[in-house]
Amino acid sequence: MKKIYLLLVISCMITGVVNAQKAYLRLGVGGGIGLKQYNGEGWADETHTSTSDNFVIKSNGLGGGFNVNLAFGYMMSKYVGLELGVNEFIGLAKKTHYSSTSSNSEYSMDSKISGMMLQVVPAIVITPGLEKLNPYARLGLIVGILPSIKEQFDGTDNSNGGNYKATHTYTGKTKISGGIGIGFTAAAGVAYILSEKFDFYGELVFNGITYAPSKGKITEWTEDGADQLPGATTRDKEWTYEKEYNADETIPEGSPDKLPKTSFNFSNVELNIGIKFKL
């Protein structure tokens, strides 16, 4: 009887270990190249003079940057598993320059824009289950939460007259936020089995995701070093993005301004590496 009981205990322990080894944690880092997006306005290097106005259109796709990802997975069989990942995307800044020259003034502005997004990624993993070098594919959804886009402006205005000093300087920062991003992800990679508990992996990932913010605000605004925000109205420093609005509507000073709905492309192609720990 004792032997039977001992065998049952051992059997349960083995079963628990086998089941536990179906679960894993994956920790990785990587970088990506953003896909281009052109909307025909706003994002360009522009050089304006009294006789010409030249543009070099820039992509405002914001998918270029770095990511840190953590995922929990469970292999339902040797070949198919489910995974829930969390990725922190940190975008690289994109730059534009504007300059204008006339007979009595010179004006220039430099701007930088970058995006950030916390991404929740439920996915399915498919693999042939090889022993040493195991390829895999991962397909899933991306839900971008707490997204934000930040833009910074720095400019100078040299004028011979008007309300400004001979050299007028200004700075500004804006933050666009609200809403969520929705997209999909597809990855192809290979895992190298280091030991019974650890795998090293490398993967190529395509992420297709766009983000339409719901609101924005100016977070910094100075002219010649003087803070302009305390005297600014709500309409001057805040706005919402609307699908439908009346362009002729008079917005009260105490309410946010209204702008047309717009979207930003966070799609990219990433190369990620990391470690998978089998529980």
Image (cartoon, grey):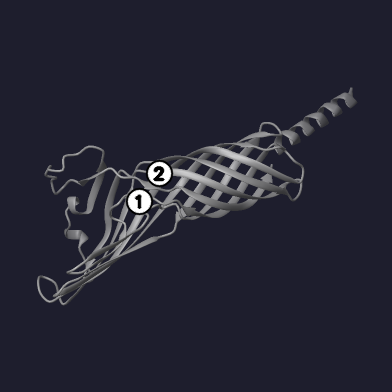
The location of residue 175, given as percent across then percent down, is 32, 53
Find disc 1 in the rendering and name its residue. Answer: 38
**Quadrant of the image occupied by residue 164:** bottom left
The location of residue 101, given as percent across then percent down, is 20, 71
Q: Is mark 1 on a helix, strand or loop?
A: loop
At 17% from the left and 57% from the top, the residue drawn is 232
Q: In this view, does 274 lie above or below 181?
A: below
Q: What is the distance, in whole Å, between disc 1 and disc 2 at their CAs?
A: 13 Å
Q: Quadrant of the C terminus?
A: top right
Q: As drawn, is 189 to the left or to the right of 68? A: right
At 19% from the left and 51% from the top, the residue drawn is 234
Residue type, mark 1 in image: Tyr
Residue 169 seen: no
Q: As drawn, is 111 to the left or to the right of 64? A: left
Find disc 2 in the rendering and name its residue. Answer: 210
Q: Nearer the viewer, mark 1 or mark 2?
A: 1
Residue 174 seen: yes
